[in-house]
Image (tube, rainbow, N blue to C red):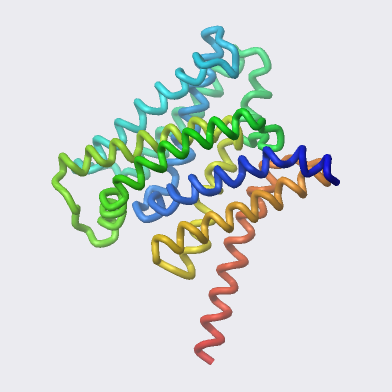
Amino acid sequence: MLDNLIFLSAPIAGSILLAGILGYFGNHILSRGIIFIDIAVAQIAALGTMIGLLLGFAEDSVSVEISSYVFTLIVISFFALTKFQKQKISQEAIIGIIYCLGLGLALLLVEKIPGGSNYITKTITGNILWVTWKQVIYCALLFALIGIIHIYFRKQFKGISDSNRNGSLPFSIQKTRMFELVFYITFGIVIVKAVPIAGIFLVFILLVAPTAAITLFTSNWKKRFIGSWVIGVVGSVLGIYISYVFNISNGPAIVCLLGISVFILAFVKLFRKQTLKS
């Protein structure tokens, strides 16, 4: 039992970190109504990694990571700087096109990479069960730095997210774009670090599902953040344990648990509402 706990300690610590940082960003993403930006950015990050591999760099090398950052930050900066321009094409449509483009290019390049099909599978499903303490500590330091930035600009980021509901920007267009650029660059950095550990689908579900579930019960920002973090941690740790015990894929196990939890909590909310009416 002790050996199992020692082996699972790094994956559990990694899931706690990812649930926290993605739960925080999830609150902003859902408030802004750009639900699928995460999966699009994650796909672009994976594409950047594939291009680094094609250039001959090792998968875990700094060069491959830089390649992933470059592609991600170009796309995310374009999105942030053009968001508040009058557009005939909706932001969600642009996000969808970016995702399809990134996936299409990845599928074209996969045949040129040795073991490319395995890499695609790993990118989609992830393998958090094999995360190392080195990765966990590195992510913890990076996420802490990003957390400091977001604490410092918390009023600005929250004001912009809330503006999507009330319809009025809290700042001038120039200032709003500047704050948006900082927000999306930090978001892109988190996605680049999260995808190799958790995979595209798990990163997406951690961003959306816990926040969607807790939003059913409260609109308070602080409570939503804490609640989404708790839901994400419980679902991730339980999924890791189930995948380890039954020798099944950890990513899909966590995704299914978190997805089901949203519907369970939705039924709980509906039942409570009906009970109060009666």
Give the side of residue 50 with respect to residue 72, left or right: right
**Figure label count:** 0
Quadrant (top left/top right/bottom left/bottom right) for the C terminus: bottom right
x, y (%) of residue 102? 46, 28
Give the side of residue 270 with respect to residue 93, left or right: right
- The residue that appears at 41% across and 28% down in the rendered structure is 72
| Furthest-bottom residue in this view | 278
Image quarter of residue 234: bottom right
The residue nearer to you, when weighing 208 against 100, is 208
x, y (%) of residue 104? 50, 26
| Furthest-right residue in this view | 1
- Relative height, residue 149 to residue 68 (above, below): below
- The residue that appears at 28% across and 41% down in the rendered structure is 180
Image quarter of residue 37: top left
- The residue that appears at 41% across and 33% down in the rendered structure is 98
x, y (%) of residue 40? 45, 36
Give the side of residue 76 with respect to residue 134, left or right: left
- Relative height, residue 194 to residue 162 (above, below): above
The residue nearer to you, when weighing 46 against 92, is 46
x, y (%) of residue 105? 49, 22
- Relative height, residue 225 to residue 107 (above, below): below
Give the side of residue 43 with respect to residue 124, left or right: left
Image quarter of residue 263: bottom right
- The residue that appears at 61% across and 52% down in the rendered structure is 233
| Furthest-top residue in this view | 56
